[in-house]
């Protein structure tokens, strides 16, 4: 690989890498998907950092109505104290009244669940209507009146047990058993946390409803995600994403984005390299596929950063159709899949979105040829929508994504029809990058095309020859994996220059009247050769005047390469001509580079030569094909071509079979005698 070629290939890739890094998200990706009422399918989630539980908009609105400037104290409920004292209560000896045990344990559980504060804690409670109580790793607001002091807890225990056993001297029994000693504070005032929560609260409306410490269990595997847990998880997500960026880890995000972007770019490069490395040599197509990939990746990352829920509105399958217009399937599919990697890596619900767009893009590619024109495009949109909705719904059932019905379905429906609106951009791309789409090739191949109709009218023999060459070339292209549509069009237009002087060519001699002399009968060999050669330059002028794409006009320039008009050159030499004038008998063309150009050169020569055979036996046909192709090789016409020996061998077999089928032996029908 030459240095200049490497620069042409890798310089745009460096620019593309910069685009990927520039648009990559600046926050860490949240790893969990959840919704109210669903089962938590992940492992037990523990907080990796301290974070406040943020209020919902409804909660803030409610607080705004009754906002006060009173500081709300924060208490932590000790589950350990509760468990230890309940266990002790179960193990006490209740002397003559063992029947009290169940009532005592049950009452103590109720009292401890509401909370018992120390005398110091009671002083904090004075004047407070609401306090924060952290229980089950989450903080909630509870009325201060519901919390017990030590004396109030004992009175509540005595009252509850006495109500169940009015005939028993409960107070004496509890005192004798040491039950009262088990009533200890399990609510501890956290002055530091109270100050922290107060400092984070808004002057008018508090933004938080609680606080979770690092290491606390947020939710266990298999738990139902309640509305309260959704609020906690949302708060955790927000704090986690912001802290990774602002907590001194900014360099980690940049490093991750650089490495991930580089990985995507490497996948993109090798997707082209392994599917069709010739794309690197066709610079316009290479720049087109790079631009398409960059635009698609940037679009994904912009939506991921700013409008992640609107990703469903982007008609990504249309990018597969943009590729299909100029590339074959072996290139389209891997490049399209790699182009969706930013969704998989960075987007919320990335797995579901990636799978959905791969599936819908695949089906769109498969059915496009049958639904690409007119009203059928609407059927294509419906098919795309159906596949997208089905895959997205399946992902929702499996928990990969939280489906918002019917909003998400409406988005997918709109995106499917946006695909129809976005497809015509392909014609703009065709102009910008000087490419030829498959639809453009189909238009050029129609017999109703003005230029082909003119060729048929002025040079009917040449037109029939072009049709035969086209059919033969398509058979070879199909056999060796070349571009069948391109070679078909190239074959139809390769000899259009002949209609400027049709009588010069033997296939059009039927146009000469019986009393006219043949075109070359009165010309010198050099004049005859010059007139024949001129059909290449005439063809290029016609191609330019009729705005034929370069990829098509290249067939005009290469179908004879730099060959010599051997018949008239040999005649010239026999008449004593100077061999140094050989260049005047050679075509001013260019040697073929692509498989398609080689196919046309071979087919054009052999189709014409096969008409001169008198014996169409397999041996005679084989000798003709082998000789003519070997002559091209010996003359150096194929030395710049991208075609292998194996492909040439396959082409020979196809040509031999094709000629044999056209010129097969026919039965002789007997003549019926007239009565």
Image (spheres, rainbow, N blue to C red):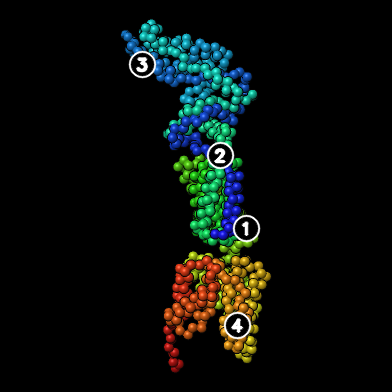
- Quick one: label 3 or label 2, which is nearer the N terminus? 3
Label 3 vs label 2, nearer the camera: 2
Instruction: Please report the residue visible at 63 percent of the width from the left and 86 percent of the height from the top.
Output: 524
Residue position for label 1 = 429
Residue 579: mark in rendering = 4
Label 1 vs label 4, nearer the camera: 4
Where is 594 relative to 176, above or below? below
Q: Determine the CA span between mark 4 and mark 2.
A: 73 Å
- Quick one: label 1 or label 4, which is nearer the N terminus? 1
Q: Which type of secondary structure does the marked residue at label 2 adopt?
A: helix
- Residue 17 appears in view: yes
- Residue at the bottom extreme, as displayed: 675
Residue 117: x %, y % from top left: 49, 14
Where is 48 relative to 422, above or below? above
Q: Which type of secondary structure does the marked residue at label 3 adopt?
A: helix
Where is 327 relative to 518, above or below? above
Quarter of the C terminus within the rendering? bottom left
Residue position for label 3 = 90
Residue position for label 2 = 253
Q: Which type of secondary structure does the marked residue at label 4 adopt?
A: helix
Label 3 vs label 1, nearer the camera: 1
- Quick one: label 3 or label 1, which is nearer the N terminus? 3
Query: Which of the pair 582/516 is nearer the observer?
Result: 582
- Quick one: label 2 or label 1, which is nearer the N terminus? 2
């Amino acid at each position: 690989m030459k240095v200049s070629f490497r620069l042409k290939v890798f310089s745009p890739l460096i620019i593309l890498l910069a685009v990927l890094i520039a648009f990559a998200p600046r926050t860490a990706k949240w790893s969990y998907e959840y919704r109210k009422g669903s089962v938590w399918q992940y492992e037990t989630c523990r907080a990796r950092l301290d974070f406040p539980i943020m209020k919902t908009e409804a909660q803030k609105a409610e607080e705004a109505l009754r906002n006060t400037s009173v500081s709300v104290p924060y208490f932590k409920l000790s589950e350990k104290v509760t468990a230890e004292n309940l266990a002790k209560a179960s193990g006490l000896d209740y002397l003559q009244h063992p029947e009290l045990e169940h009532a005592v344990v049950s009452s103590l559980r109720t009292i401890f669940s509401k909370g018992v504060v120390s005398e110091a804690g009671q002083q904090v409670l004075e004047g407070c209507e609401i306090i924060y109580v952290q229980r089950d790793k989450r903080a909630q607001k509870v009325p201060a009146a519901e919390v017990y002091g030590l004396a109030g807890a004992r009175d509540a225990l005595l009252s509850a047990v006495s109500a169940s056993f009015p005939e028993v001297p409960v107070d004496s029994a509890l005192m004798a058993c040491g039950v009262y000693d088990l009533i200890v504070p399990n609510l501890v005032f956290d002055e530091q946390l109270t100050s922290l929560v107060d400092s984070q609260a808004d002057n008018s409306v508090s933004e938080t409803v609680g606080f979770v410490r690092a290491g606390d269990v947020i939710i266990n595997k298999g738990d139902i995600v309640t509305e309260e847990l959704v609020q906690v998880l949302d708060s955790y997500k927000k704090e986690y994403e912001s802290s990774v960026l602002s907590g001194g880890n900014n360099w980690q995000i940049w490093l991750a984005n650089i490495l991930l972007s580089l990985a995507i770019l490497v996948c993109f490069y090798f997707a082209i390299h392994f599917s069709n490395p010739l794309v690197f040599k066709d610079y316009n197509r290479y720049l087109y596929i790079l631009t398409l990939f960059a635009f698609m990746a940037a679009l994904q990352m912009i939506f991921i950063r700013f409008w992640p829920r609107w990703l469903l509105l982007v008609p990504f399958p249309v990018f597969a159709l943009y590729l299909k217009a100029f590339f074959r399937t072996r290139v389209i599919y891997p490049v399209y899949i790699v182009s969706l990697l930013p969704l998989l890596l960075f987007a919320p619900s990335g797995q579901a979105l990636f799978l959905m767009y791969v599936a819908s893009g695949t089906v769109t590619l498969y059915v496009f040829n049958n639904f690409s024109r007119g009203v059928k495009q609407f059927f294509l949109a419906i098919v795309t929508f159906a596949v997208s909705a089905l895959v997205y719904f399946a992902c929702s059932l499996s928990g990969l994504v939280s489906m918002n019905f019917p909003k998400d379905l409406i988005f997918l429906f709109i995106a499917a029809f946006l695909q129809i609106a976005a497809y015509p951009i392909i014609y703009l791309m065709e102009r910008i990058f000087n490419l030829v789409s498959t639809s453009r090739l189909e238009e050029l191949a129609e017999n109703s095309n003005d230029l082909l109709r003119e060729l048929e009218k002025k040079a009917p023999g040449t037109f029939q020859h072009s049709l035969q060459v086209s059919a033969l070339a398509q058979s070879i292209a199909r056999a060796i994996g070349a571009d069948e549509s391109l070679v078909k069009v190239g074959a139809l237009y390769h000899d259009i220059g002949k209609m400027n002087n049709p009588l010069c060519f033997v296939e059009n001699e039927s146009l000469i009247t019986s009393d006219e002399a043949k075109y070359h009968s009165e010309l010198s060999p050099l004049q005859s050769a010059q007139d024949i050669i001129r059909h290449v330059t005439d063809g290029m002028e016609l191609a330019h005047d009729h705005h034929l794409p370069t990829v098509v006009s290249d067939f005009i320039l290469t179908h004879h390469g730099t060959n010599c008009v051997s018949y008239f050159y040999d005649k010239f030499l026999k008449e004593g001509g100077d061999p140094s004038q050989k260049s005047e008998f050679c075509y001013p063309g260019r040697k073929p580079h692509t498989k398609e150009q080689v196919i046309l050169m071979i087919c054009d020569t052999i189709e014409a030569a096969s008409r001169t055979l008198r014996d169409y036996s397999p041996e005679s046909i084989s000798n003709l094909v082998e000789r003519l192709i070997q002559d091209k090789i010996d003359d150096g016409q194929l030395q710049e071509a991208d075609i292998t020996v194996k492909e040439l061998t396959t082409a020979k077999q196809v040509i031999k079979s094709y000629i044999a089928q056209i010129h097969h032996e026919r039965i002789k029908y007997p003549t019926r005698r007239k009565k």
